[in-house]
Amino acid sequence: MKKGSVLLIYSILLSLLLACNSGKTKQNTEDAGTNVEYKIAKNYFIKNDVDGAIPDKITAQSEFEKYFGMAATMDPEGTPTPIDFSKEYVIVADYGVTVRDVILNPASLTLKEGVLNLEYKAEEGEEQGFTSRPFLLIVVANATQGEVTLCQVKSGN
C-alpha cells in the first residue's frame, strides 16, 4: 500500500510540473508556444459580494461587471484601463483571500495547440491587519483564442 501511495504522489507532482511547463526555459520558445501580446488592466477591484471562484476568462462586459468594479484614483494614471469587450477579453489570475500584502505580476502568456498559458509570479510581503484578494487582469485581443491555463511560477528571489 505504501508503494502505491508514493507512486500516486509522484504522479500528481509530475502532472503539476508538466501542466505549468516549469521545466521549460524562455530560450526554448519552440516548445513553449507563441508569445501573445497583452496589456495589464489596472485600477479595478473585486466586488465585496463575490464569493467563490472568478472565471479564468471573461469575454463580456456584463459578466465582468458581476465580479469587478472600477477603482479610479487621483493619480495621473489613476483611471481604470479601458477594456473593449467587442475587441478584447480578460484573463484573471485570482490569488484568493489573504492577510499578506501580495503583488501578482505576469511572467509570460503563450499560445500552443489551442491553449493559452498565463504564467505569473506572486510576491508575498508582510502580514497586514486586514484581508485582501489580490488578482491580476490581463487584456488580450479577441483574435487570439484558446483554453486558458494559469500557473503561478516561483519568483527568482
Image: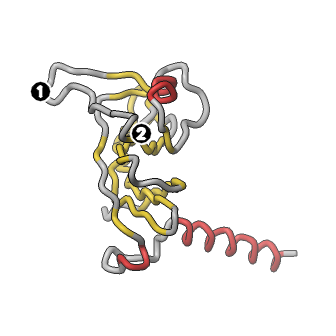
Res 37 quadrant in image:
bottom left
**Location of residue 62 with respect to 119 vertically, above or below:** above
Measured in 3D between alpha carbons, the distance from the residue under mark 1 to the one under mark 2, in whole angstroms, is 22 Å
Q: Do the residues labelled 1 and 2 touch (CB within 8 Å)?
A: no
User: How would you rate the neighbour count of disc 2 (Cα within 10 Å): few for under 14, some for 14-19, many for 20 or more?
Assistant: many
- Residue sitting at x 41%, y 62%: 154
Residue 4 position within the rendered picture, expressed as x and y whole percent measured from the top left: 82, 76
Which mark's residue is nearer the viewer, 1 or 2? 1
SS at badge 2: strand
Q: Of residues 71 and 138, which is closer to you in this image?
A: 138
SS at badge 1: loop
- Residue sitting at x 81%, y 80%: 3
- Residue sitting at x 43%, y 30%: 132
Is residue 131 visible in this depiction of the protein?
no
**Earlier along the polypeptide chain: callout 1 or callout 2?**
1
Q: Of residues 46 and 138, which is closer to you in this image?
A: 138
Residue 102 position within the rendered picture, expressed as x and y whole percent measured from the top left: 37, 42
Extreme-left residue of the structure: 76
**Location of residue 140 with respect to 54 vertically, above or below:** below
Residue 85 position within the rendered picture, expressed as x and y whole percent measured from the top left: 39, 34
Query: Disc 1 marks which residue?
Result: 76
Give the label on residue 140, or none: none
Figure coloring: secondary structure
- Residue sitting at x 31%, y 62%: 157
Q: What residue type is labelled 1?
A: Pro
Give the label on residue 135, or none: 2
Is residue 11 visible in this depiction of the protein?
yes
27 lies left or right of 60: left
Q: What residue type is labelled 2?
A: Phe
Quadrant containing the N terminus is bottom right
Residue 127 position within the rendered picture, expressed as x and y whole percent measured from the top left: 39, 37
User: How would you rate the neighbour count of disc 1 (Cα within 10 Å): few for under 14, some for 14-19, many for 20 or more?
Assistant: few
